[in-house]
Structures are given as C-alpha cells and as structure tokens.
Image (tube, rainbow, N blue to C red):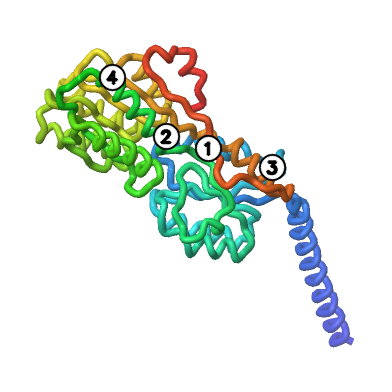
Amino acid sequence: MLKCKKCIAAFLTVILMFCLISCGEKSENSEKDENTNLIVIGFSQPGAESAWRVALTDSVREAFTEERGYKLIYKDGQSKQDNQIRDIRTFIQQGVDYIILSPIVETGWDTVLLEAKQANIPVIICDRNVVVSNESLYTAFVGSDFKSEGEKAVAFLEEKYASSEEEINIVHIKGTLDSSAQLGRTGALEKAVLEHDNWNIIAENCGEFTKAKAREIMQNILLEVDASSIDVIYCENDEEALGVMAALNEAGIAYGKDENITIISFDGTRNALEQCLNGKINYVVECNPLQGPYLFNIIEMLSAKKTVPKITYIYENAFEQEDLSEDFIKNRKY
C-alpha cells in the first residue's frame, strides 16, 4: 500500500511539472505573438563621438518607435569597423527585417553585405556611403552629398579671395580617413587647390572628427608654421573646428570674420553656429543628421513592396554670420 502511494505521488509530481512547463511555454509564446507585428530594424552606428552623431541616432530612434509599428535594435560600433561588421552579423542571426548601416569607412563591407543579401535582409546605408563590388549588395542610400558640401565651402573661399593675387595658405584638418565625408570634403578642396595657382596647403593631418585630436594637431602645427602665414583653416567637421579654435585661443592667435585667419567648418551643430554668429567661424556648411524621417519613408515603401530610389540626398544649407540669429540656433534640434 505504501509503495502504491509513492507511485501515485511520483506520477502527480510528473504531471505538475509538465503543467508548469506548458504554462511557461504558453506565456513565452504569447509574449512573442504580441510582438510579431512589429517590424524589426537593426541599426549600426560608428559611435557617439559628436553631438552630430548623437542627433542622427536620436532622429532614427524617434522615427522607428513601437507606436509606429517598429522595434529598433541599436548598436554602437565604438569607432571600429570590426565591431560594426560583428553587429551586422548579429542582426542577421537575429533575423531582423531591415538593417540600417552608417559605415565608419567606405570600403570593406562586401562580405557582410553579401551575407545580409543571402539572408534576404534589405540594407539601407545612411549618412556615409559604401564602395562595394556590386551595388545590389545594399538596397538604398540616404544621406549627404559630401562632394557638394565641399564645393560650397570652396565657392565661399573663391568669392572671399577672388581679388587676391597673394598666396593663400591653407591648413587642412581632415576627418576620419576613407569615410565618405572625408573623401568628399577633401576632394573638393584638393581640386580647388589644383585649379588656383596661389592656393597652397601648408599643413594637413587627420583630426578623426574629434575636438581633442584637432586641438592636438593644431598645437603641433603652430610649433612648425608661423601663424601669420596662415590664411585658412579648413576643418572637416564642427568638433575639429572647435578643437582648432581652442589651440588658437591658447596661443593668443586671432581668427574669424574680422581677422586674417578664416575658419571653415562642416555639420552645423548649435555650438558651431553660435561661433559663426559671434564671428569666430567664417562659414559653416550644414550636414543634416535628421535622417530618421527619410529612412522611415524608405522602409515604409519597401514594406509596401514599392520601388525605392537608390540614392536619396537630404536637404542641407550653409551659413555665414548674417544668415544666423539666436532664435534660429536655439530652435535647432542639434
């Protein structure tokens, strides 16, 4: 009799365990079912090295919310391409519906983009572009025309120095090498130097789009170059311009609208525009980070099985002191 009771107890224990497991599975599946209608997007950024980069991330996050039917998985590449490639492979393993990639550099993406294509996951490139052996490896590009940005800056310098026959000496602070922004902005300047016999690049280095690096570079340049010989400092983003200005301030060297040194900057963040309004930066070419709505429209079209443009350039402006006001700058989102 005791043995029979033990058998019944063991049997009931097994039944109870089965019920608990079944309930757990049902609960997990129910939660998953509630989210199956969300379109899942993997978003890979190079990092968060500047206010501009943070604004781009915020813009994408605001565009793809659960209220609008999306789940966004964000990855910070910590300024390393290897990290971004690893993150994209993670997205592929997770089976996301779309991948948005803001690449740190243009090249080196063929293999991982092929993996995404083989997994039937459309990839939208944003901000900076990629150079691949087959453009079908990505679905669309949304971002800036960096060549056009550089040409705007060059046009400003051409107008400013149009009547000058003296040598125009330029210090060039490049952005992250081989990024689309660097290649486009550098290309425009180098082309202009070739076309103007009196334009000279007297010093150049890579500031990596950061204030600290540009400040260090400018400090070293001032040890080697007579500041009175510098006419233009061409900085490939606002952070670099702010770093250059810090170095000039430390050295007691005047610059800006009413001085001998002209400063060019790119991006159009609040800090740079305030310096432009104050006459410290001569010309700021906008690079618009508010790309979320553009990306949203592309993915909405793809989800509706519509054909999307291969390239979408976003609207951008350029600013001198007289184009700006405190209210305008205050109302900027970045």
Q: How many marks?
A: 4
Q: Which residue is found at the position 84% from the left and 83% from the top?
A: 7
Residue type marked 4: Lys
Q: Position of residue 103 (x, y in %)?
A: 45, 49
Q: Position of residue 259 (x, y in %)?
A: 21, 16
Query: What is the C-alpha distance between the residues marked 4 and 1?
Result: 28 Å
Q: Mark 2 highlights which residue?
A: 148
Which of the two labelled residues, at mark 3 and mark 2, occupies the earlier sequence position?
A: 3
Q: Mark 4 highlights which residue?
A: 160
Residue type marked 2: Ser
Residue type marked 1: Tyr
Q: Which residue is found at the position 38% from the left and 24% from the top?
A: 271
Number of the label disc, if any, that sits on residue 137? none
Query: What is the C-alpha distance between the residues marked 4 and 3?
Result: 50 Å
SS class, disc 2: helix
Number of the label disc, if any, that sits on residue 66? 3
Discs 4, 2 touching: Cβ within 8 Å? no
Q: Mark 1 highlights which residue?
A: 313
| Up/down of 123 relative to 149, above or below | below
Q: Quadrant of residue 195?
A: top left
Decide which of 269, 26 is in the foreground and name it.
Answer: 269
Query: What is the C-alpha distance between the residues marked 4 and 2?
Result: 19 Å
Query: What is the C-alpha distance between the residues marked 1 and 3?
Result: 27 Å
Which of the two labelled residues, at mark 1 and mark 3, occupies the earlier sequence position?
A: 3
Residue type marked 3: Glu
